[in-house]
Amino acid sequence: MRKLGILTITFLLCLGPLTLCAKQRKAAPAGQSSSSAVGGQARASEDAAGPPFIIGPTDVLDISVWKEPTVSRNVPVRPDGKISLPLLNDIQASGLTPMQLAATITEKLRKFLTDPQVTVTVITINSQRVYVIGEVMRPGPIPLLPGMTALQAISLAGGLTQFANQKKGYVLRNEGGKDIHYPFNYRNLLRGDMRGNTVLKSGDTIVVP
C-alpha cells in the first residue's frame, strides 16, 4: 500500500448539524491544487478554508481508521482535553485541529498497523458557543460555526420577535477583562449593509433589546 502525503481538511457547512472532517489524502501531482469540489461540497486545504476549527473539551469526535473497525469509534473529548482509543490509550485532542489530530493518531498507529488511513470528524461541537439573548424567537446558546457572523447567529435563533428594537442590537465581547460592545442595525443588515455584522468568537453574546 502506498504511503499517504499531504493532509487536507474538509469542511461541510450546512443549515443542519456542522460536520468538520480531516483525513489523510494522497498528495496531488505537482502543479495541481489539492482542492476540489464534488457534488457542490467544497474540499479545500486548511489554509484556504480560513481559521481552522480547534477541538475543545466536551466536543464529540468520530475517529475512523480505514478497514480497522475495532479502532474506529465515536469518542468524547474529556474535560482534561484527551480522548481514549484502543491500542493508543490516551491522546491529547484539545487544542488541535482535526487535521493535526488525524496526523497524531496516524503516527501513533504506525507502530501497530501498516499505512493507517485516519479520518477525524467533529460530529458535535460543545466547546465553542455563542449566546443570543433578548427579543429573538429562540434565545440561548448556539454552537459557534467557523466564520459565523451576528446575522447568522440571529438566523439560527429563529430571527427577531415583533417587539425587537432592530436598530439597537449589539455583540458583547470580553476582551482583556473589559466588556466591548459591537453595535449592529439588524434592518440594515437585511438590506445588505454588512457594517456591524461582526464575525463571532467563542463566548460572545448577541443582545437584541
Image (cartoon, grey):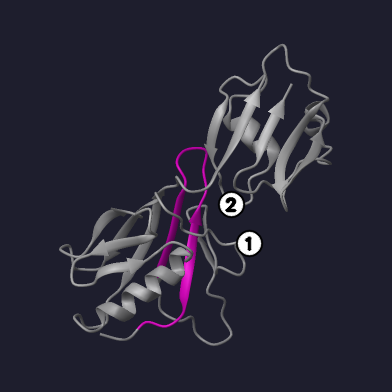
In-front residue for pair 35/97 = 97
Task: Please say if 199 is above or below 141.
Answer: below
Mark on residue 146?
2
Q: Residue at x 38, y 70 (%)?
A: 102
Which residues, given as a range, are shown in magenta? Answer: 4-23
Q: Nearer the viewer, residue 178 or 159?
A: 178
The x and y percentages for residue 129 are: 54, 42
- In the visual, does 119 lie left or right of 67? right
* Residue underneath mark 1: 50
Q: Secondary structure at mark 2?
A: loop
Residue 25 relative to residue 161: left or right: left
Mark 1 residue crowding within 10 angstroms, few (<14) / some (14–19) / many (20+): few
Instruction: Check the image and report above or below for 159 versus 153.
Output: above
Asked if marks 1 and 2 touch (Cβ < 8 Å), the reply is: yes
- Horizontal side of 6 relative to 63 (left or right) equals right
Q: Residue at x 38, y 58 (%)?
A: 80
